[in-house]
Image: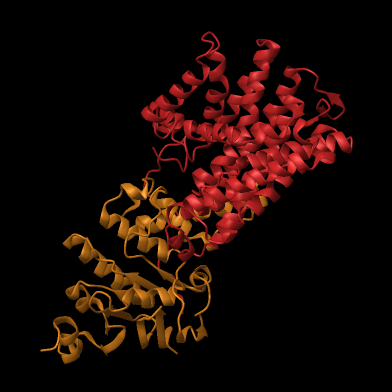
Amino acid sequence: MAQPIVTPGPTSPTPRAPRLPRWLFWLIPLALLPLPLYLDQYRQYVVNLILVYVPVAIGFNVVIGNLGLLAFCNVAFFGIGAYTSGVLALKLGLPWWVTILPAGLMGALAGAAASVPALRGVRLFYLAIMTLAFGELLRWVYIRWVPVTGGSFGMSVPPPNVFGWVLDNEGHKYYAFLALAVITVVLTDRLLRSRFGRAFMAIKDNEQAAAAMGIPTDRYILLAFAWSGFVVGIGGSMYAALIGHITPIAFDLTELILQFAVVMVGGLGSLTGSVLGAALITTAPEFFRPFPGFLELLFGVLIVLVILFLPRGLASLLARLHPLFVDRYYRD
Amino acid sequence: MALLEIDNVTVRFGGLTAVDEVSLTVGAGEVCAVIGPNGAGKTTLFNAVSGNAAIGSGRILFQGEPIHGLLPHQISAKGVRRTFQNGGLFGDLTALENVLVGLHARVESGILGVLLASPSARRIETEATARARALLDLMEIGHVADQPAAQLSGGQQRIVEIVRALATEPPLLLLDEPAVGLAPHMREQLVSIIRRLAGQGIGILLIEHAIELVMSVADRVVVLNYGKKVADAPPAAVRADKNVLEAYLGHV
């Protein structure tokens, strides 16, 4: 009954839009390799902090930018990752590198749990407040579950250890963090450019039409949350390794707003934007040090200016430079 | 056996009976148009077929199998595809990506293959992209393939939506007011597209207000009024039907 409607020809006569060759991406981490040679320990720490916020922002962006759901539970995934990594290292004596994957998996589990309201059809502000409550609930657990988490005082995490090497200075941590940041960026990019990422975007634009195209929307909402949790959970384990001490206050609403600012300043839905946002928001306070007492003010003004002049974030600045820099699924 | 068989279907919203014991069939290669005044239950009937509205009683059979009670994505996977009245395109995706979403069920790459960029996952993606491009070229809108759908003209959007719905070669296509807002020459193109599809054996259920378009393209016209079927006949017969005149003009 179903006859072929059309028989597509072997080649398309229409010219394709130009795109940068994908291998060019690898020049960026390559160029960043010698960085520790030029930075003191403190500056290296700031760079490492940027690298922590790369997975944190790209994970957050998958749910709010690509899937388009107002889910504000990113600190929950971040915290779960950090505590999983910390507890496994401190209580079981596992080396840090072994705890990275479990941290991501626990984050994914938290993501799956956090997707339940969305799967029940909760949307918009209602979803925002319910997911916010999820993050606060976990914070309550960190505070109350004293034997495991150390309660309000938190827990000290042993120095990170990779294949027996102790990463005891910032330069050493840098290489581990750079590798993790690159891995999370590359994997998320592959996911977003596949049918999975297209399904996320379709759900964002028109959920009913997405279902009419044969997309089981629930399954993809769950997947987006779980992937977000996975990536952000890895960011959490990096955070634990960087700071060496984790406390519940590091995963509070202020932190959530900061992470939200990273995504918005970078560009909703843009992977490149998430990386740029992480770099700007993390380093900005350092540039404001000459003006003590004005830090919060200047930080606020910076965010307002970026959103005012680049409503689609730093990613749109890049896109304006040259059409080749427009990244896929991001529209200025 | 009819391709689509709507058998005594009733849809209620609270106390309102939007579709009232309607039966109709669509055969392979047949263009069946559903017309009626605003609020007659046309779109609700569509939603019932595509799984977006639950039916209160009756049956909906596709290729002899009941499909009522299935979820929209399951009905779509069975080969019943639809377009939407108010632009169902994914505005942030390009025309090409819209068609690729239409091909979703055919792009069977697994998540591990995607994450590891396995050769088979890449090949599946490349083949799907080539097919989507070819489909757009065939409908003569290949030149806008890489533009975001939201930036296309109304006519181009309508055609992309039809291409997207057809990408998986479904046996049955539901078109919800495809001619709204189209310029006259685009309407002619639409008519020729519908004819071509029907000629290839696709069953088409069409909701349309543009009567001249309906009369020129439909094999059969079903008229709904207050949720009830008041006529079901070839266009010429419907034109002369007393019940139809009453539905549109009131009791005369």
Compared to residue B172, the image places residue B159 above or below, namely above
Which chain's colour is red? A
Coordinates of residue B28 in the picture (x, y in percent) = 39, 82
**B56 relative position to A89: left or right:** left
At 24% from the left and 66% from the top, the residue drawn is B179
Q: How many marks?
A: 0
**Quarter occupied by residue B88:** bottom left
**Quarter occupied by residue B164:** bottom left
At 64% from the left and 44% from the top, the residue drawn is A135
Compared to residue B202, the image places residue A50 above or below, namely above
At 39% from the left and 37% from the top, the residue drawn is A332
Chain B tint as drawn: orange
Image color mode: by chain
Coordinates of residue A127 in the picture (x, y in percent) = 53, 52
Compared to residue A189, the image places residue B230 above or below, namely below
Question: Is any atom of residue A299 visible in this view?
Answer: yes
**Quarter occupied by residue B196:** bottom left
Coordinates of residue B166 in the picture (x, y in percent) = 41, 66
Q: Nearer the viewer, residue B112 or A129?
A: A129
**A107 relative position to B71: left or right:** right
**B42 relative position to A1: left or right:** left
Compared to residue B191, the image places residue B100 above or below, namely above
Q: Residue furthest left?
A: B252
Coordinates of residue A139 in the picture (x, y in percent) = 69, 41
Question: Is any atom of residue A231 visible in this view?
Answer: no
